[in-house]
Image (cartoon, rainbow, N blue to C red):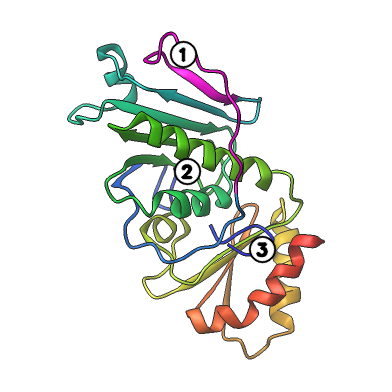
Amino acid sequence: MIPAGAQHSGKNSAGDIPCRSGGIPGAGATQIKDSAGIPYSRNTASPDTPFPLIRDGTMDTWLFPVISSRLRGVLGTAGRSCSSAGILSVPVCHPGQLFAAEEVLGSDPALEADIQWGASGGSFELRLFSNDSDKLNRLLTELTGILQRDSTRRVRVYSSLQPGPLLRRHLAAGQQEAIAVIDAASRWSSIGLAEQLLGGCPDAGLSLRAERNYCIISGTSAQLANVLPGLTRFVDQ
């Protein structure tokens, strides 16, 4: 992502269908802000008991150190041998969730993830599965910290010069496209900021696509890299 948000991808563009992957292989480098751990209270007398990492009204993050037989159907783990699960649920989708997920999860191809995300609204839900509950704890804590800090920004900007499968799938990016997202909380505010940027770079060769509350700028990695400094200043507005 960029320093203003970060370079950090459901109803996807084809419908509200969860996608399953073994981690997020093939993702290029994205940039995100550093994240601090979030404190939680765990019942150390019962280490196998599910516990929340956070419940603040804007998101739920739960760790299930042991998946019981009762939970397997609820979590959709049929055919999976993983012993632990982690859930991150947010009532409203925004593109920063996808960038954060690709950044944090992309380095672990062994991790199993189900992601539900809707470009036209709806909720975001991430389900992680592993035999290492401590790893799930760490990843969920990092993701939650990123999203909490992101929510305080009036204008959020994300970019990836080499989007991985997750970003390409949900943001409809081409195989060779680099992308940047401007999320200014409304469709026309996002479009207006994008036009301010692109109007000052008439020969940049970039394209603009508007979604419900954000817009996507795309082009080659070289083309996008040339305008990243201009994108950064939007974050401070």
Residue at mark 1: 44
Vertical side of 172 occupied by 92: above or below: above
Instruction: Check disc 1 and give the amino acid type.
Output: Thr
- The front one of 75 and 218 is 75
Percent coordinates x, y for residue 138 in the rendering: 46, 37
Residue 226 badge: none
Q: Is mark 2 on a helix, strand or loop?
A: loop
Indicate the position of residue 5 as horizontal and vertical percent values: 65, 57
Residue 53 % position (x, y): 54, 26
Specify the segment rendered in magenta: 35-54
Q: Quadrant of the C terminus?
A: bottom right
Residue 156 inside the magenta-drawn segment: no
> Can you give x and y, in whole percent of width and height, for residue 25 in the image?
31, 57
Which label sits on residue 117?
2
User: What distance separates the C-alpha of mark 2 from that of mark 3?
Assistant: 24 Å
Foreground residue, 84 or 190? 84
The N terminus lies in which quarter of the figure? Answer: bottom right
Question: In front: mark 2 or mark 3?
Answer: 3
Residue at 65% x, 40% y: name it: 148
Q: Give above or below for 236 relative to 83.
A: below
Q: From the image, give the main secondary structure of the stretch colored magenta.
A: loop
Residue 3 disc label: 3
Q: Which residue lies furthest to the right in this view?
A: 237
**Does label 1 or label 2 sit earlier along the sequence?**
1
Residue at (36% x, 22% y) in the render:
65
In the displayed structure, would residue 177 be above or below residue 184?
below
Q: In which quarter of the image is residue 90?
A: top right
